[in-house]
Image (tube, rainbow, N blue to C red):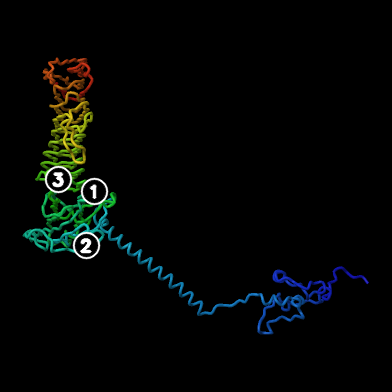
Amino acid sequence: MIIPDDTPISPAKSNAALPNTISQSSLLESPPPYYGAALGRSLSLQEQQPYQPRIASSSSSAIPNESTSPILMNRPRDLEANEPRNRRESPAKRFCKAFAVALLIYMLAVIFLGSFSHKMSSYQKKTSWHGEFPIPNDIVVNSCIRGSQMQNSSIDWDQSYGTADFLALDSSIGFSSEHSAEPLVVQSSNGFGYGSVQTSFSLPLSSKNLFLISRGPTSSGNSLRIESSSDLEEGTARVDVRISYAEFAQRDFSLLTGVGVCLVHKKRGKGNQVGVGLFTSRDVPSSTYPRPQLAYDVTLVLPEARGPSLLRLDAFETDLHNFHHFFKQSLDEIVTFDKLTLKAGNGIIIAPSLTAGIATIHTSNREINIKSLTSKSASLYTINSEIRGHYTISQSLDVKAVNTKVKVDVEVYPQYPNSGAVITAQTTQKALEAIVNFHDPSHSFKLPNSSAPLVSPSVLPSNFTISTNNKNGVVDVSIPMLPSDSALSLKASTTNGRVTTTLPATYEGSYALTTTNIAGEVRMEHTEDPEGLERRRAWNQESNKGNNLRGMVYWDESKRNKSAVVLKSVNGQAELFL
């Protein structure tokens, strides 16, 4: 008998070859052999059941027939006990867990949205004023009051800082009895309504910078004053604001509604720069007729000095468009400033006397007239109006004007020996006149935030610089006084005008005159020795080519190059008086 190699092995022999123990992993990973073919018959797809591991169960019907599964016949009994049971959680337990998670998410959402809503509300309150009023981006609004809300009210910085936009009005603190508690409105026969409202603000003098700012249309006839009062507490200043207005009575829009007076501070400075802002809404009609009018009357009230020392402010700044700065009282009898900045576009700036370490005075279309300004450094600027006054400085003076006349008297007191001072002045179309006296450093005076004045005589020379320029106008610079050992550098130029310079007898150095069309001229007027040494003054004119004139003048030949004067005129004459 020949037995083919593909004869299947009998189940009995196959079972005998199986080991007594089979690992659980091998049972789970390998499918059972195809026993139907070994028995010599084919099983239908319905009869071919996949392998199912034995799972202990209380139901006997769940146990496979061991007689038909040779592998399960030899499966260890302890494997059944180690198999995990799949137990599903009850619906109630799953619901409780889901509810707890949902509740936690809801609570977190409420907290987050509440905080976000509060922040957005605060942000909108702060930014709403910037949206309605032309407030500069570097200005932070702390609190505001509209003109329509103003009565006899007083607003204190400490109380209002960070409060709501509209402040509670305190009618118990008001102005004099001539002002009514309610806005006074007078109806005229031409249909205009006239009236005024007012309020007060309290500012801390401990601030590094107190400032006033205004922005917006429909404002005219505004004025700023500075006064002192014995009624104020020490360390506190008060800002009184009165608004006078005129508007057409039949117009639906209320002019005072579009006016905001605010306590503000600057972003830089960490809250040390506080002030008052006067703002007019962008929505206020400005092109209608009759045109509504506003006028601000602002007064900075300072406490009177207690003791021999004057009140001193670190810095005071105004940026008030269309405001006249009227300082009728001598402010250096009330207060001195380390830094003073006055900016009044289209407003006059007039003061009898001011004292400041650094002074900046700018305006346009209006004049600057300071009877006496004492400062280490000062800057003046205007357009289409005059700059006049008497200025005493120790370091620098810068005068700039356009289409206007400049006429200044300057006293220069160097703070230290061998220190210098720089004076620049320029304008167009009109005359530029300057009289400058240079003093010996031993005559120095005390300025705010500076060291004590010098009392010892000068042992080192000072260096002074003057530069003037004009277009279509005359330049006239006169120097009556110059210390003997000082060096002077002077340049004066103009076009379509005459340039004239007068120097004292103490001048020693060179000169140069350059002109077109008209020859320059030099005149010797001082022949007496200013030192009383009976020296003879030398005068050497080195060249005279065309309209260029150069020379030297001196008492001591070693000082013939110590100073220099340069005069230049286009289409005008140049004159030098020695």
Mark earlier in primary sequence (3, 2): 2
Residue position for label 1: 208
Amino acid type, callout 1: Lys
Mark earlier in primary sequence (1, 3): 1
Specify whether 324 is left or right of 113: left
10 Å neighbourhood of mark 1: few (<14), some, or many (≥20)? some
Secondary element under disc 3, as helix, strand or loop, is loop
Amino acid type, callout 2: Phe
Residue position for label 2: 166
Query: x, y (%) of residue 484?
Result: 17, 23
Label 3, label 2: how far apart the Cα atoms are: 37 Å
Q: Quadrant of residue 73?
A: bottom right
Query: x, y (%) of residue 461?
Result: 21, 26
Specify whether 343 is left or right of 72: left
Quadrant that contains the C terminus? top left
The reply to whether the C-beta atoms of the residues labelled 1 and 3 are less than 8 Å apart is no
Mark earlier in primary sequence (2, 1): 2
Where 466 falls versus 40 (above or below)? above
Residue position for label 3: 310
Secondary element under disc 2, as helix, strand or loop, is loop
